[in-house]
Image (cartoon, helix red, strand yellow):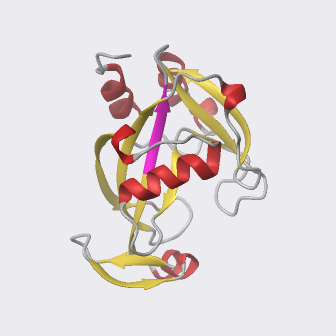
Amino acid sequence: MIDIVDENNEVIGKKEKDLVHTEGDWHRIAHVWVFNSKGEVLCHKRAKVKKMFPDLWDVIIGGHLDSGESYEESAVRELKEEVGIEATADDLIELGMWKGVANLTEPNNREFIKIFAFRFDGGIESLIPEEKEISELEFISFDKLREIANDEKERRKFVSFVYLNNIIDKLESFDNL
């Protein structure tokens, strides 16, 4: 079950995730951009068994908030579940909130997405991808991601670049990169 919210992001009830998508209810999502000090973002190829966007590359770790869960709790949980990264809410860098309708798969997929960054300088071999979610992991440089965002053919291999350049600009601005 996940919380459904009104247009002001206030909880008004809860439903099963599939119903929220098909019925067009506003709901909450946490996104985490995992980056390293080399100026790279952790990207993953979505598993072929995924209902939405199978076998496409993605630049975020994240998902729906469970009912009663905070954005930070969800982000920490998703990092652990999807790639085996142990983190705390204090480790997250809040980048902002996005409110919108993602018409990529469902006609009325209305979401409030809180976007976080997490710095990870461990090796990719230390990560544990969740098999039902992820088939491949790769660090891709900010510059290469910008090239992909501007190349129609390459961009089709990825889920979405809705706010890519804005996020990369924010990640590059960190003094500790």
Image quarter (top left, top right, bottom left or bottom right) of the C terminus: top left
Q: Is residue 157 visible?
A: no
In this view, the residue in front, 176 or 153, is: 176
Left or right: residue 155 compared with residue 20: right
When asked about the image quadrant of residue 110, the answer is bottom left
Residue at 38 percent across and 27 percent down: it is 168
| Identity of the residue furthest to the left in this view | 8
Q: Is residue 54 above or below residue 165?
A: below
Q: Is residue 14 visible?
A: yes
Q: Where is residue 83? Give x, y as percent.
A: 63, 42
In this view, the residue in front, 147 or 143, is: 143
Q: Is residue 15 above or below residue 143?
A: below
Q: Where is residue 156? Give x, y as percent.
A: 62, 39
| Residue 33 is inside the magenta segment | yes
Main SS of residues in magenta: strand
Residue at 63 percent across and 49 percent down: it is 82
| Residue 166 is inside the magenta segment | no
Residue at 60 percent across and 40 percent down: it is 158
Which residues are the magenta region?
A: 31-35
In this view, the residue in front, 142 or 121, is: 121
